[in-house]
Image: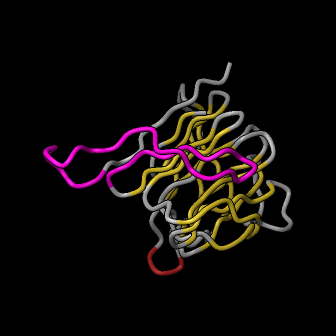
Amino acid sequence: TYANFFNTVEAGMVYWATDGGTNGGDIKRMNIAGGPVATVSIATGPVDFMKTDGNSVYWVGGGKLKKAPLLSGPPVILGNATSKTLDIDATRAYALNGDQIISFPLGGGQADFIGNSMTTGVAVDDGHIYASQGNKLISVTKNGDPPVTMWMHAPQDIGGGCTLSYSISRV
């Protein structure tokens, strides 16, 4: 799965959000080779970040984490999420709600608090959650162990903070 803020590619299909004003737009899809455009979900609300997992499309927008089936269907709210970042693994979605990193079951249900002060980005692999926090890159185990600082700007570095851009290749 590859993602950008408003589009994602899964199994030869590209998915994107249209801008529909205050009510949000629609989630659309089309074969990467071209062809007709299909509507996956309508009136989604704002879309700030999108991912797919082969069965559903997930997006953060309007303070919520939502999902809809890839083939078409109404959006389902999985929980509150305020960030413009999102990652998924085989069973959970990971997003930020304020300064907290939260994991949400992909099928719905109780969300779990993972940690505090995760501010701008989130990415996951099999055992860890990676997040940017001000001038640091932090790793947290999925079971919620204390965060470990992986990298930090030195005081003489130019720039203020780091932005997480992390990709996991899935074969």
Numbered disc total:
0
Pick the front one: 170 or 56: 170
Pick the front one: 19 or 83: 83
Q: Any magenta on residue 156?
A: yes
> Where does the N terminus fall, quadrant-wise?
top right
* Image color mode: secondary structure
Q: Any magenta on residue 168?
A: no
Span highlighted in magenta in the image: 135-161
Q: In this picture, is 48 found above or below 171?
A: below
Q: Residue furthest top?
A: 171
Q: In this picture, is 139 found above or below 98?
A: above
Residue sitting at 81 percent across and 57 percent down?
105
Pick the front one: 39 or 23: 23
Residue sitting at 84 percent across and 63 percent down?
108
Instruction: Give the quarter of the image for residue 52.
Output: top right
Where residue 132 appears, as percent x and y from the top left, is 43, 51
Pick the front one: 100 or 35: 100
From the viewer's perspective, is 40 left or right of 25?
Answer: right
Residue sitting at 51 percent across and 55 percent down?
85
Where residue 123 appears, as percent x and y from the top left, is 56, 44
Q: In this picture, is 113 found above or below 130?
A: below
Residue sitting at 53 percent across and 45 percent down?
148
> Where does the C terminus fall, quadrant-wise?
top right
From the viewer's perspective, is 57 left or right of 48?
Answer: right
Where residue 86 appears, as percent x and y from the top left, is 57, 53
Q: Residue furthest bottom?
A: 22
Where residue 84 appears, as percent x and y from the top left, is 47, 60
Instruction: Give the quarter of the image for residue 113.
Output: bottom right
